[in-house]
Image (cartoon, grey):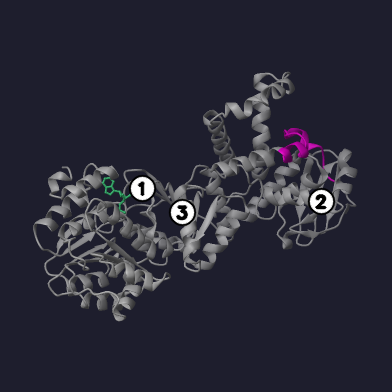
């Protein structure tokens, strides 16, 4: 079936051609002919991503007399973002229709400007309920000539407490109008609206009622609450090409997680209701343009997001309302593409996972958080892919090549590959060296014990010097952070660092004796998170020379150099991969800036 078969006016067909819409989606094919042939009410059960905007927009446009400058159609949507999106779509559909005018009405922007837009002769008004009500009260909009009233994402509007606003708005419209209601789910409250305002509505369902899209793979990971953020980072590292949405429970947490991710070098931005409209627009623009890979959002703020290629939706916290799981997940797996919906659940949240499974009528697969080694492998091959596919800018790089070739003349191809990969990748390997298992079935204590045993096993002689530092776990120190600090300040490779023992207020670590002075001098003015601490030789000496079993990647200075170049370059490109050898308490950027200050 084509759009022509549906009986749309020529101007609309031309506009659809421009948009590249060839065939109607199932919901369009089902609803458009029925709505055009009769004056009927309609209830559409459909997720976003099914083409529902055109399913109601195109028949609405057919019913409007664009020679008249009065409001004949009203669309109500839960958020400004969604309202703007719908209005923009309508403007595209009507671009060849003479005199067509669409007004967009939402809070947080000038009410006078919006009133002027209506007054200029808008035939269709797309609005959020609160502001529309306000404008009706102030006589800025009249709905007494409305032929069709459309409620989009009705379940969400009711969740957001717009029940009374909707009632008041619909009361302003003529009795003989038609109501077309779209909703992803059909809770009692939506059914009540349908019953109150509609007569014998056509029912259109895309997919099964309340069922999730089968293009989405649903997985969950069991974690301890305190590891939630680390589990998130691990998943992001495991998916270097992610273009994703992360949902958090509150506005505050949304901001906090976005801040932490940005600090840790990820390409992320927050989206929540405490931001100004222009900040939200800016975040959305960056996400749409793909200059930002990850949007951290609240449920409400994410309602209007209409982006097609989202690869992953991550539920940092499970949704408060089980039904919202579908809304969130429906942001991926759109337009026939595959997507993944990832949840993190602590032990006490497992019951919620079961409740969600009942609603979506699909199993959410339990999966294991990848190990540090698996993440490294994934990142390494992403790097190799990047090398294979990178666009070589011959002109710019050409002038440096003779000198570079001369410097590398003695390297074989194998050595060159080894060196380039190591230069780019060593810091990442170090960060994940000995990384903890974040799956909650293995306790942290067991893991720590295993780590210690492993390090002990690698140390068998007494060629090590043991150091004592006056900073410990109370200050947030962990093994990775010690490795980073030692390497950064004393200019040795992490492979020279042996056993590490952490206590609440102090810690010990071993380094090969030949570096003892270098470490003592280098770390004399070292700091951890901006706090200075003292270092001294420990009374009891360290273990052995196990470091020989670990291959190291050159000295720290050369690594630091490659971090600056490689990390930043990649960050600019789009992917955030590999530029965060450290956690928030010692990421590369922190380390580099600290070094520059010294
Ligand atoms: P919606 O469910 O209205 O948010 O639409 C999801 C996406 O599908 C939007 O990006 C639309 O532009 C696109 N779309 C809608 N209808 C069609 C169609 N018939 N052919 C191709 N793309 C479509």
Q: Residue at x 32, y 76 (%)?
A: 135
Where residue 490 sits in the image (x, y, percent)? Answer: 82, 45
The residue at which mark 1 appears reads as: 333
The residue at which mark 2 appears reads as: 598
Q: Quadrant of the N terminus?
A: top left
Q: Residue at x 67, y 33 (%)?
A: 422
Other-residue count near label 1 (Cα within 10 Å), few / some / many at <14 / 14–19 / ≥20: many
Which range of residues does the magenta coloring cover? 542-561
Q: Residue furthest bottom?
A: 137
Nearest the camera: 175 or 229?
175
- Magenta stretch: residue 315 in it? no
Q: Which mark is residue 285?
A: 3
Q: Secondary structure at mark 2?
A: loop
Q: How many marks?
A: 3
518 horizontally vs 459: left or right: right
Q: Secondary structure at mark 3?
A: helix
440 horizontally vs 503: left or right: left
- Magenta stretch: residue 558 in it? yes
Q: CA distance from mark 2 to mark 3?
A: 38 Å
């Amino acid at each position: 079936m084509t759009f022509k078969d549906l009986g749309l006016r020529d101007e609309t067909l031309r506009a659809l051609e421009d948009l590249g819409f060839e065939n109607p989606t199932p919901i369009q094919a089902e609803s458009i002919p029925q709505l055009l042939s009769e004056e009927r009410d309609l209830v559409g059960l459909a997720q976003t991503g099914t083409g529902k905007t055109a399913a109601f927009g195109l028949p609405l446009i057919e019913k409007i007399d664009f020679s008249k400058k009065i409001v004949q159609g009203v669309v109500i949507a839960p958020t400004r973002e969604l309202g703007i999106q719908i209005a923009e779509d309508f403007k595209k559909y009507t671009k060849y229709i003479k005199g067509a005018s669409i007004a967009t009405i939402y809070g947080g922007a000038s009410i006078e400007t919006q009133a002027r837009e209506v007054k200029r002769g808008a035939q269709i008004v797309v609005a959020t309920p609160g502001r529309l009500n306000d404008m009706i009260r102030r006589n800025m909009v009249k709905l007494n000539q409305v032929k069709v009233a459309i409620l989009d994402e009705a379940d969400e509007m009711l969740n957001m407490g717009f029940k009374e606003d909707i009632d008041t708005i619909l009361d302003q419209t003529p009795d003989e109008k038609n109501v077309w209601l779209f909703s992803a789910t059909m809770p009692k409250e939506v059914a009540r609206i349908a019953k109150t305002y509609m007569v014998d509505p056509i029912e259109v369902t895309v997919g099964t009622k309340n069922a999730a899209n089968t293009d989405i793979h649903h997985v969950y990971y069991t974690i301890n609450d305190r590891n939630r953020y680390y589990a998130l980072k691990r998943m992001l590292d495991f998916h270097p090409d992610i273009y994703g949405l992360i949902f958090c429970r509150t506005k505050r947490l949304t901001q906090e997680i976005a801040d932490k991710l940005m600090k840790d070098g990820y390409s992320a931005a927050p989206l929540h209701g405490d931001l100004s409209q222009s900040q939200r627009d800016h975040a959305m623009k960056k996400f749409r343009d793909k200059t930002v890979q990850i949007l951290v959002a609240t449920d409400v703020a994410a309602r209007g997001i209409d982006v097609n290629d989202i690869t992953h939706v991550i539920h940092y916290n499970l949704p408060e309302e089980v039904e919202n799981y579908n809304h969130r997940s429906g942001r991926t797996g759109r337009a026939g593409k595959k997507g993944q919906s990832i949840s993190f659940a602590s032990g006490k949240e497992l019951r919620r996972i079961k409740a969600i499974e009942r609603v979506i009528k699909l199993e959410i697969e339990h999966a294991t958080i990848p190990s540090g080694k698996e993440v490294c492998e994934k990142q390494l091959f992403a790097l190799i892919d990047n090398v294979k596919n990178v666009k070589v800018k011959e002109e710019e790089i050409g002038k440096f090549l003779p000198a570079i070739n001369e410097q590398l003349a003695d390297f074989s191809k194998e050595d060159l590959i080894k060196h380039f990969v190591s230069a780019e990748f060593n810091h990442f390997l170090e960060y994940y060296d000995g990384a903890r298992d974040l799956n909650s079935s293995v306790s942290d204590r067991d893991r720590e014990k295993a780590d210690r045993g492993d390090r002990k096993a690698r140390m068998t002689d007494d060629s090590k010097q043991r150091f004592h530092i006056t900073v410990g776990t109370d200050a947030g120190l962990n093994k990775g952070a010690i490795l980073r600090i030692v390497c950064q300040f004393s200019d040795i490779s992490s492979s020279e660092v042996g056993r590490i023992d952490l206590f609440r207020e102090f810690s010990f670590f071993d380094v090969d004796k030949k570096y003892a002075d270098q470490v003592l001098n280098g770390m004399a003015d070292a700091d951890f998170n901006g706090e200075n601490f003292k270092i001294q030789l420990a009374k009891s000496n360290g273990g052995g020379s196990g470091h020989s079993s670990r291959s190291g990647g050159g000295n720290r200075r050369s690594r630091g150099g490659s971090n600056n170049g490689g990390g930043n370059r990649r960050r600019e490109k789009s992917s955030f991969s590999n530029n965060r050898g450290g956690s928030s308490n010692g990421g590369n950027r922190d380390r580099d800036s600290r070094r520059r200050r010294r």
